[in-house]
Amino acid sequence: MGNVTLKNRIIFAPTTLGLKKEEYFKKIQEIARGGSAMIIIGDVPVSKKGHLSLHQKAGFNYYKELADLVHKENCLLSAQLHKSDSNFKGMIKYIPGILTKKITPNDLRKLLNDQVKVLINELPTSKVKEITSSFGDAAKLAVKAGFDMIQIHGDRMCGSFSSTVFNQRTDEYGGSIENRARFAIESIEAVHEAVPTVPIDYKLAIRQENPHYGNAGVLLEECSTFVPLLEKAGVTSFHIALANHSELSDCIPPYNHPYFNQEGCFLPYVDEVRKYTKLPCAAVGGLVHPEFIEKSISEDRFELAAMSRQLIADPNWVNKVINNQADQIHTCVRCNKKCLGGMQEHKGVHCIYEKEN
Ligand SMILES: Cc1cc2nc3c(=O)[nH]c(=O)nc-3n(C[C@H](O)[C@H](O)[C@H](O)COP(=O)(O)O)c2cc1C
Ligand code: SF4
């Protein structure tokens, strides 16, 4: 990936675990020790303030400690840089309804999405430029803290700028595909300028119609224009998944999802993206079985397999495969009970297998 060579093709997909520091570090260490080549740390903020900002001493030291820990296990670390598109100001008026439970969690998700549109369309151009250049500042700090690679989160603000569902701007950031890609392109260029030798991975969030899934991100039919633009801006690899801002269980689909219920459920998106780039691509989404991954790689469908829930279920997946113990893998059954379920109940991400590992 770029000028970095991975020891194998297995990556821990960006996963916010919602755990306290000690438990979180322990989980990340287990995954690094379990043989994965790289861990992508989800949702590292580019903002100057706030929880775990790289600009704050506490945040910087937190990531430095994490990088040291992961490197000791001969594993690499990537920072998923993101800018939130939550419109907190726009949500204030709904607080009474939330507190009195008149607004259900489902209503709240819809209201949040409506407010994203307001934020994206009203953001002054000067502020947009400030945000895109902040990706460069954050990248510099991330590399200083020890990260080996930068992943730009193509969902969140990059994704809502990319999508006509949210972006109805009439300036150079709205309208044509080239204009909607401008936010992402400027962010990529800022990272490239700040850390020119560091590989830049892009989490390409795809949305589709017929049936409709995903709201932010890039329409499948727009990949032919979007992908070359991102590559030209300096991206060195792609990580391809369904876009967010719809149901979380679409992006993290359970075994009984009405549409994404198969292993490798987002692979058709990777197939489409690969028509327009020769860069390495990471697939994600319901990947669990070594045979399936091996076959897909041999068919040249992707170079890298990113897994979130499978490595939560069994951090030792890679070592077990290497040591011919694949029959002992705790296979993720995509029940979402304790991972997504744990996150939604504010208990942190866990797994039904936890005690057995
Ligand atoms: C608990 C949890 C937290 C996640 N957090 C993030 C995140 O911070 N950033 C991100 O881009 N994706 C996040 N994801 C999505 C995963 O990276 C991945 O795309 C998705 O879970 C599908 O892959 P899987 O079937 O291997 O779990 C999260 C997934 C889970 C289960
Ligand atoms: S709780 Fe279920 S879906 Fe989540 S990681 Fe464990 S086995 Fe997989």
Image: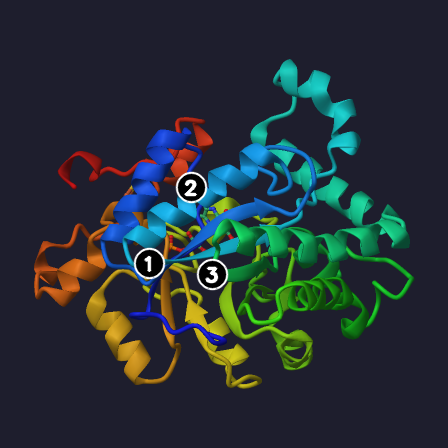
N-terminal-most mark, 2 or 3: 2
N-terminal-most mark, 2 or 1: 2
* Disc 2/disc 3 C-alpha distance (Å): 14 Å
The residue indicated by pointer 2 is 65
**Left or right: residue 44 compared with residue 71:** right
Is label 2 in a helix, a strand or a loop?
Answer: helix
The residue indicated by pointer 3 is 148
Q: Amino acid at mark 3?
A: Asp
**Left or right: residue 122 compared with residue 38:** right
Is label 3 in a helix, a strand or a loop?
Answer: loop
* Disc 2/disc 1 C-alpha distance (Å): 14 Å
Residue located 8% across and 66% down the image: 324
Residue at the extreme top? 100
Image height check: is 200 above or below 57? below
Q: Amino acid at mark 2?
A: Glu
The residue indicated by pointer 1 is 75
Q: For marks 2 and 1, give the one nearer the viewer.
A: 2
Is the shortest distance between ligand 1 and the CB of mark 2 under 8 Å?
A: no
Image quarter of residue 229: bottom right
